[in-house]
Structures are given as structure tokens and as C-alpha cells.
Amino acid sequence: MRHLIDIRDFSKEEINDLLEVAEQIIADPVAFQDRCAHKRLATLFFEPSTRTRLSFEAAMQALGGSVLGFSSADSSSAAKGESVTDTVRTVSCYADIIAMRHPKEGAPFLASQQSEVPVINAGDGGHNHPTQTLTDLLTIHREKGRPNNLKIGMAGDLKFGRTVHSLITAMLQYEGISFVLMSPPELRIPSYLREMLDREGVPYLETDEMEANLGDLDILYMTRVQKERFFNEEDYVRLKDRFILDMEKMQYAAADMKILHPLPRVNEISVKVDDDPRAVYFDQVKNGMIVRMALILKLLEESK
Ligand code: NCD
């Protein structure tokens, strides 16, 4: 059974194929509107979500399928003490494919081992978020026309930001990639990622300076400080406003730099930046639904 738990579960070729299908969907959505007729997607969200859950549901509906699920742990038997694996064994009797978000790292992986149907990791704690990475890759592809030879800046919470972890992992397989990792020292990337970058010989700079590093970036990936993953409120309050992108800082950025953000935004991008043509984070939202359509098709096809 094929699942998507970590972005490395898919080869570079498979990711390229997915992005190709996403482009076909954009060009002719009607051709896909019945592709999942009589199929059901279950969304099991043990953590809050707006875009990820709704885009999965909208994606399945756009393919002619139907959806069921829950949007908080409180409204499921998890509140009674049921294990994730028992929940998944149950849900795989009702659904053809499952998208799961959970606050515990590794929970979707455990679930996938007990599931009769494909499981998609829709975010596990501060660990991974592979479908956001597919969204980011489609956005990069559409905005920059290439996945190679890019200088990518990432700013904010690089420690707890699971979208950052999955995107860095995915970009390691492309040529000519370098990173500028901008965060307070306390919120730098986890050491396993630093080791991966070193092993792959990918150039990167870790810095707490933003203005001075914006000038030659192709992409600026902004992130929210992940309040829910902090051990104490005091640290969050001290760190939350350190990396804010406003129009003043945008003066230092190149005319063709693109700003991505997985959203939700709190205050790390000033709303004035939204009108700048370099801001593509709301286009990213649309791409998220499209690429999830391509993903559902692929996994259902492979589970036949
Ligand atoms: C992200 C997440 O859940 O990790 N949101 C998303 O899925 N688009 C980013 C975040 O919550 O900050």
C-alpha cells in the first residue's frame, strides 16, 4: 500500500509527474470532475486547520468523490482514549483514502502501518508536512518556471515549522539550490536537517539578519512562529515579532523575488505587502487544492 508520510516517499520523477498532472487539472478541470466518483476521502484532523483540511475536501469534491471526517480530537473517540491505530483501522472500513493531521510526530506513520487504505500525512507535530511541500513546489514551478538554481530564503520559526522541514528536504534533490535561513538563534533548523544539508553539500547560511540578505533571493519563504509548540508563553512573546516583513524591507528585495507563506499568517507579513506583485501566498492556496487532487488520484490509482 502506497502512503505519503514523508516527502521522500516520492521520487523526484514522481513529484514531477504530480506537478504535470496538476498543470493538466488547471488547464482542463472538467476532464477530472468524475475521476473519483463513488470514492470517499476521510479527513482525520486531531489539530486545527483551515486550508489543509478544506483543500483536501474541496479537492475530493472537485474529483467527484465525497468526504467524511472530523476536525478536532475533541469530537472523535480520541477524547475517550482511543488510539490512533484503532481509529484508522475503523476509518479504513468507511473510506478509500485518509488524510490525517496529528500533534504527535510520527502518528500518521503509525496509522499507515495499520491502514487498509492510503494514508496521507497532513502535518505531524513540528515534524513534517509533505502536502504543503507539494503545494510549495507547484507554486515555485509556476512562479519561477524551474525547481533548479534557486536561492531560497526562509524566515521565522525554522525549528518548529514543519513546512520548512519538508520543503528543505524536498529541495535537496534539485541542482543549484542554496538556502539563507533567517531566524532568532533559538528558532534555527533542527540538527538532523543541518546534517542533511552538510551531507548533500548544499550551501546554506544561518543568520538572524533579514534586510542584508534579501537582495539576491529568488524565493522568500515566510513562516509563523508556532505558538502551540512552545514550552512557555514567555519565550513565544519574546520571539514572535523578530521577523516581520513590511514594505520597508521589501525595498531590499529583487523585483522578481517571490514571497511564499504556508499560511496562516499572524503578523509576520504586513498586510500592505499583499498588494505587491511579489506576494504569491494566496495563489499558493489555490495550488494546494490542485496538487492535492493530483495526489489523491495517484494514491487511489496505486492502491487498486
Ligand atoms: C502550516 C501548518 O499547519 O504547519 N499551515 C498549513 O498547513 N498551511 C503552517 C502553520 O501552521 O504555520
Image: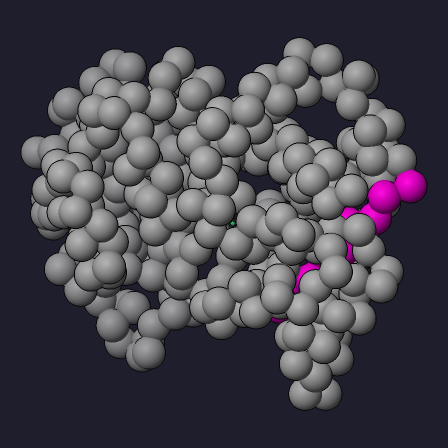
3 on left or right of 170? right
- State the image coordinates of residue 29 (x, y, percent, origin top left): 74, 19
Quarter of the image for residue 244 reads top left
The answer to if 47 sits in the magenta stretch is yes
Q: For the image shown, how many numbered marks are present on the structure?
A: 0
Using the rendered image of the protein, determine whether residue 204 is visible from the camera's viewpoint. Answer: yes
The way the protein has been coloured in the rendering is: one colour
Q: Is residue 295 above or below residue 75?
A: above
Which residue is the extreme one toward the bottom? Answer: 81
Q: Where is residue 35 shown, x and y percent of the image?
A: 82, 29
Compared across the picture, whether 26 is left or right of 265 comes to: right
Occupied quadrant, residue 119: bottom right
Seen at 75% across and 70% down, the residue is: 89
| Residue 22 belongs to the span the image colors magenta | no
Whole-percent x and y of residue 234? 27, 76
Q: Is residue 149 left or right of residue 286?
A: left
The magenta region covers: 38-48
Residue in the foreground of this view, choosing between 50 and 95 = 95
Instruction: Locate the C terminus and report the quarter of the image it occupies.
Output: top right
Q: Is residue 302 above or below residue 250?
A: below
Q: Nearer the viewer, residue 282 or 69?
A: 69
Query: Is residue 281 visible in this depiction of the protein?
Result: no
Q: Is residue 128 above or below residue 54?
A: below
Q: Residue at 62% across / 62% down in the picture?
A: 112
Query: Residue shown at 24%/20% (left/top)?
Result: 149
Residue 195: give x, y in percent of width and height: 18, 54
